[in-house]
Image: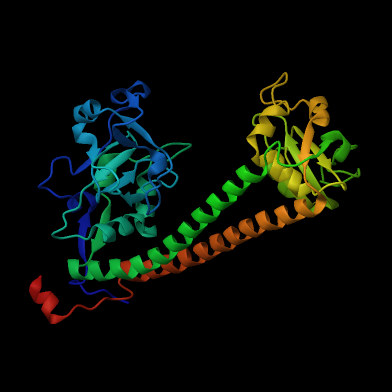
């Protein structure tokens, strides 16, 4: 469908800035201007790369600097309601709106401030346009870096965009916000479930909660790898050969089909436990355990989620975070009766299943929203304005 010349007007991103404000389109400080030694426990919050979500601010990482330091870097300050754009992947050029939980913020070196001229542009429309797939591809084409794309302020400034008049921007923003609200509601629900999940783990998995004690070695047995897989991925032995290669895991997964439930304890790099049932893939430097004398998943929740147990069972041998197997077998667990174990697993699994379902629903909503944005931002779906709105403009 052809687009009439008066529906869109051509701009570049730097045209969108509010020229009445100083540094309304600018990047963060040089790394040497804001060092770790400048960090404080309170003061002016620093927005890191991890805080810049693809359309939403991620409020999980908090570091601060002093008011004095923020004043020294006043050109790199950013304020509630303004847009911050990431210089680095992943993905490059993602943008979100600064929340109003602080009076001001300080960008790190990987942020770009865009304070929009609100007499001509709708800030929410612009942040969605920056995140729009066609704009993202333009940004990626100008990105540099062999391992992680990065874009500078000058290159970002000249990215071309096509924007309708303000009244249309407002209407499109209202449409998109309806979808954003539905997605946000589900994300908030997930956050509440995660809190409930973690609170239950803290409450239930404590040392003195139950009186039935047993050594791990009395409950579980170790699954030994008697033979390696052949180069074709054939399973020659009874148990799988564990590999850290993604390619190998993908190639061998079809052969990891066993009638059992397993706990895998990693012994290298990072200490953790994983649970597998039936078909599974695994990683190198692992010990694999199974049992019929307790609920394997209950043991998984206990071992993986209770840091006291993890700290206590000997992840401190000759290597980094190394599992001491002898100590592991001797370690005593406080276990409830089997019916309680089963009930706990059922409850925790129901929370995880609900979170998984919500994640799938969010994914579907996001796809539908993306499709709608494609139509709105290209003009395939045109928004009409009234005669009075045109006159007001």
Q: Using the rendered image of the protein, determine whether residue 306 is visible from the camera's viewpoint.
A: yes
Residue 23 vertical position relative to residue 39 in the rendered view, above or below: below
Residue 323 picture quarter:
top right
Residue 339 picture quarter:
bottom right
Residue positioned 48% across, 37% down in the render: 147
Give the x, y percent position of residue 123: 24, 57
Residue 174 picture quarter:
bottom left
Comparing 370 with 379, the one in front is 370
Residue 54 vertical position relative to residue 202 in the rendered view, above or below: below
Give the x, y percent position of residue 327: 80, 25
Residue positioned 59% across, 51% down in the render: 197
Give the x, y percent position of residue 22: 13, 41
Comparing 208 with 251, the one in front is 208
Q: Using the rendered image of the protein, determine whether residue 221 is visible from the camera's viewpoint.
A: no
Residue positioned 62% across, 56% down in the render: 352
Give the x, y percent position of residue 27: 26, 38
49 relative to 194 in the view: left or right: left
Image quadrant in which the C terminus is located? bottom left
Comparing 52 with 112, the one in front is 52
């Amino acid at each position: 469908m052809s687009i009439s010349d008066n529906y869109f007007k051509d701009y570049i991103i730097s045209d969108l800035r509010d020229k009445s404000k100083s540094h309304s389109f600018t990047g963060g400080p040089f790394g040497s201007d804001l060092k770790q030694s400048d960090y404080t426990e309170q003061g002016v919050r620093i927005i890191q790369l991890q805080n810049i979500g693809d359309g939403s601010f991620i409020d999980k990482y908090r570091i601060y600097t002093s008011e004095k330091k923020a004043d020294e870097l006043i050109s790199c300050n950013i304020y509630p309601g303004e847009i911050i754009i990431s210089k680095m992947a992943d993905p490059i050029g993602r943008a979100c709106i600064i929340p109003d939980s602080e009076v001001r913020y300080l960008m790190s070196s990987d942020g770009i401030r865009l304070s929009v001229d609100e007499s001509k542009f709708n800030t929410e429309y612009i942040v969605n346009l920056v995140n729009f797939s066609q704009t993202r591809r333009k940004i990626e084409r100008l990105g540099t870096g062999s391992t992680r794309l990065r874009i500078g302020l000058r290159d970002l400034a000249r990215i071309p965009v096509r924007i309708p008049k303000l009244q249309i921007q407002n209407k499109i923003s209202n449409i998109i916000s309806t979808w954003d609200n539905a997605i946000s509601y589900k994300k908030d629900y997930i956050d509440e479930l995660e809190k409930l999940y973690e609170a239950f783990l803290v409450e239930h998995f404590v040392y003195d909660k139950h009186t039935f004690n047993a050594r791990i070695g009395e409950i579980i047995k170790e699954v030994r790898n008697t033979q390696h897989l052949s180069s074709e991925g054939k399973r020659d032995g009874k148990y799988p050969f564990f590999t850290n290669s993604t390619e190998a895991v993908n190639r061998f997964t079809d052969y990891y089909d066993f009638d059992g439930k397993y706990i895998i304890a990693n012994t290298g790099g990072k200490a953790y436990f994983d649970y597998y049932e039936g078909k599974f893939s695994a990683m190198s430097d692992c010990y694999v355990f199974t049992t019929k004398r307790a609920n394997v998943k209950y043991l998984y929740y206990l071992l993986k989620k209770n840091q006291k147990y993890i700290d206590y069972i000997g992840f401190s041998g000759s290597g980094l975070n190394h599992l001491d197997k002898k100590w592991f077998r001797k370690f005593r667990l406080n276990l409830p009766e089997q019916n309680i174990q089963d009930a706990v697993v059922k409850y925790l699994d129901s929370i995880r299943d609900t979170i998984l379902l919500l994640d799938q629903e969010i994914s579907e909503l996001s796809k539908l929203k993306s499709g709608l944005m494609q139509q709105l931002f290209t003009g395939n779906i045109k928004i009409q304005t009234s005669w009075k709105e045109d006159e007001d403009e």
